[in-house]
Image (cartoon, rainbow, N blue to C red):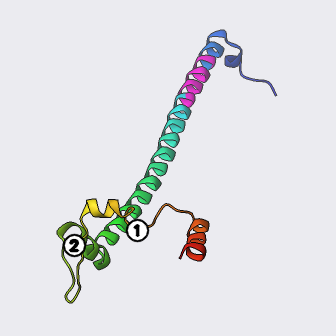
Amino acid sequence: MKLPKIFYNKFFLGAMILVFLFSALLEYNQYRQRHKIDTEIAMLKQQEQELQASNRQLEQSINFLSSPEYQDKLARLQLNLKKEGEIVINIPQQQAEQNGGAGGHSPKSNLIKWWEYIFIN
């Protein structure tokens, strides 16, 4: 089978090469745009997951802060409120520090306490 004479023409071959190069350039540009869009979509999906995790954490915080237990604790600490029938004892800060801190524990070791209990008392 013999090709038509037009395929052997230099101008036709040059024009075909130019058309091929132009279409290859267009395809490359579309590939770059698709790759850029795919990268942006992946980034946005990751950002969406981070925001959903943040929303879940905020919802848990809101649920905790609106719980009756937390509101009761907050009312006791910040507003000095008490429940009905409760007795509140206030110890001045200086007296608590002199008695060895909040728990009133002495800085002695357990071994020394036992020695004093057995042999001194």
Front residue of 83/9: it is: 83
Of the two numbered discs 1 and 2 in the rendering, the one whose residue sits closer to the viewer: 1
Front residue of 60/18: it is: 60
Image mark count: 2
Q: Which amino acid, by three-letter code, is at mark 2?
A: Ala
Pointer 1 or 2: first along the chain: 2
Instruction: Name the secondary structure under disc 2.
Output: helix
61 on left or right of 77: right
48 on left or right of 16: left
Looking at the picture, does residue 110 appear above or below residue 14?
Answer: below
Give the image quarter of residue 105. Answer: bottom left
Cβ–Cβ below 8 Å for labels 1 and 2? Answer: no
Residue plotted at (23% across, 83% down): 87
Q: Which mark is residue 75?
A: 2
Residue plotted at (40% across, 57% down): 54
Looking at the picture, does residue 115 appear above or below residue 31?
Answer: below
Looking at the picture, does residue 36 appear above or below residue 11?
Answer: below
Q: Which amino acid, by three-letter code, is at mark 1?
A: Gly
Q: Position of residue 121 (x, y in %)?
A: 53, 77
Residue plotted at (58% across, 66% down): 112
Q: Which mark is residue 103?
A: 1
